Image (spheres, rainbow, N blue to C red):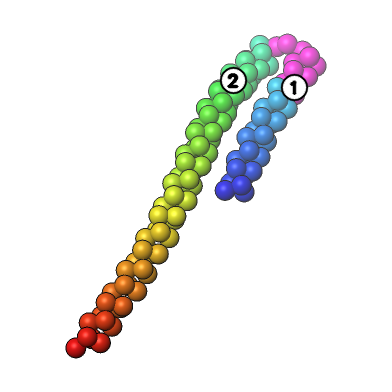
Amino acid sequence: MKALNMKLEDAFVAGAIALVSLAFGFQRMLKSWKSTEAETTVVILMRGELARLAELNTKLATEIGDFQLKVVDLNNKLIDLSRENSNLHSQVQQLTEQIMALQSALTGAK
């Protein structure tokens, strides 16, 4: 569970760092380039793509958060079911012992 959380967090952080790095890289390129129509078009397209990727990253982070909450909830349910299963095993063991005692009493009474 912790390994999954760490992998997801690491992926999210790496994505965020990549986006920030791209943004700074684009700013530096914009300052150093001479503005031509073709270059301006490329920059506009790249800004649009960066904005699209940032939006997707935000959605992904939200979905990962929801997924992690669902995993935690399922883990808690599994713990509850495991406890219930253990209790049922104990009850079956007690009933088996009572049946064996009753059978012994009945066969001894004959």
Q: Residue furthest right?
A: 32
Circles 2 and 1 in contact, beta carbons < 8 Å: no
Against 99, residue 89 (above or below) is above
* Relative horizontal placement of residue 101, taking residue 30 as reference (left or right): left
Bin the neighbour count of mark 2 within 10 Å (Cα to Cα): few under 14, some 14-19, many 20 and up.
some
Q: Which residues are magenta?
A: 24-36
Q: Amino acid at mark 2?
A: Ala
Q: Name the mark on residue 5.
A: none
In which image quadrant can residue 44 be found? top right
Q: Amino acid at mark 1?
A: Phe
Against 66, residue 87 (above or below) is below
* Relative horizontal placement of residue 37, taking residue 95 as reference (left or right): right
Mark 2 highlights which residue? 51
> Residue 84, percent across and down?
40, 55
* Relative horizontal placement of residue 73, taking residue 37 as reference (left or right): left
> Residue 11, percent across and down?
63, 39
Q: Nearer the viewer, residue 103 or 16?
A: 103
Q: Nearer the viewer, residue 4 or 87?
A: 87
Q: If you read the primary sequence from the N terminus, does the residue marked by circle 2 or circle 1 appear first?
A: 1
Residue at the (63%, 38%) spot, across then down: 9
Against 36, residue 1 (above or below) is below
Mark 1 highlights which residue? 24
